[in-house]
Image: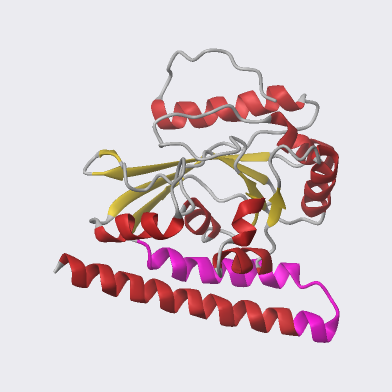
Amino acid sequence: MNTLRLYLRLARLAAVLLLGAALAGNVALIERLRRHDLMALRQRLTCWYLRRLSAALPFEVQVQGELPTEPMLWVSNHVSWTDIPLLGQLLPLSFLSKAEVRTWPLAGWLAHKAGTLFIRRGSGDSTLLARQLHRHLSAGRQLLIFPEGTTTDGQQVRTFHGRLLTGAIEAGVALQPVAIRYLRNGESDLLAPFIGDDDLPSHLLRLFAGERALVQIQLLAPIASTGIERNALARQAQRAVQIALFGEVETRSQEAA
C-alpha cells in the first residue's frame, strides 16, 4: 500500500512538472514574439503554478500572519527546496537561488523561466547582485531570499548575511521576515530538510514515501530598512525569525557578513 501511495504521489508530481514545462515554454515563446520582458505575468503564473506544485507535495500547510500589500524583500530561514513552492504560492514572488539550481534537470529550467535570480557562492559579485536586487525591488516586485545562504536541519537559524540586504536598503523597501517550520508527529521533521550531500531524487523518494507532514509558515511583522546599516538589519531579521521558531533563547552574538 505504501509503495502504491509513493507511485501515485510521484506520478502526480511528474504531471505537475510537465504542466510547468508547458506553461514556461508558452511564456518564453510569447516573450520572443513580443520581444518584451513579461516579468509581472511570469510572477503571477508562477504563483498559480506553485499552488499546484505545493498541492502535490506531502504536506499540510498552515499560514499565520498577514500578506504584505506593498512590495517587500522577503527573508526566510531555509530548510529544503520545498520552501520555494510553499512560500511562492502565497504571492507572486521572484527568488534568489544558488547557481547550482540552474543546472537541475527541468526544475532548474523552470526556476529560470519563473524569473529566479541566481548567485554563485564565493564569486565576489556582491556589487552586481546588489544592483540586480535593487532593480528588481525598485520595479515594485516582491522578492524572496534565504539570507542564511544554505539549508539547515530546521532546528537552528544560521547567520543572516547582511550583504544580501543592500538592495532593499537602497530601494527603501521593507523586509518581510518569514519563519518556516516542518513538523512530523509534533516534532521537528527529519525527512523534509535538504542538506549536506543530499541529492534531489533520493530526497524525493524519502519524502514522498512518508506520511504527510505539517508545515507552519509565519509571516512576521515587517521591518523598515530605511536608515539601518545592513548588518544590523540582518541581525534584526534573524532575531525575529529565531524568536518565532524557538522563542526567546540565549544565542551567541554573530556578525553578519
Q: Position of residue 153 (x, y in %)?
A: 41, 36
Q: Position of residue 62 (x, y in %)?
A: 37, 51
Q: Main secondary structure of the magenta part?
A: helix
Which residue is farthest left?
Answer: 1
> Which residue sits at x=43%, y=19%?
248
Q: Which residues are magenta?
A: 30-57
Which residue is farthest bottom?
Answer: 33
Is residue 52 found inside the magenta-colored segment of the image?
Answer: yes
Query: How many numbered badges does the structure rendering display?
Result: 0
Can residue 96 be seen in the rendering of this structure? no
Task: Write down the quadrant of residue 139 in the picture.
Answer: bottom right
> Which residue sits at x=67%, y=58%?
116
* Residue in front for this viewpoint, 228 or 29: 29
19 relative to 239, above or below? below
Is residue 250 found inside the magenta-colored segment of the image?
Answer: no
Quarter of the image where the C terminus is located = top right
Task: Write down the quadrant of residue 126 in the picture.
Answer: top right
> Which residue sits at x=76%, y=73%?
38
124 relative to 44, above or below? above
Q: How is the image coloured?
A: secondary structure
Q: Classify residue 95 as left or right of residue 155.
A: right
* Residue in front for this viewpoint, 127 or 195: 195
Q: Position of residue 10 (x, y in %)?
A: 34, 71
Can residue 33 be seen in the rendering of this structure? yes
> Which residue sits at x=45%, y=31%?
244
118 relative to 43, above or below? above
* Residue in front for this viewpoint, 244 or 53: 53
* Residue in front for this viewpoint, 238 or 148: 148
Quarter of the image where the N terminus is located = bottom left
Q: Position of residue 174 (x, y in %)?
A: 70, 39
55 relative to 236, above or below? below
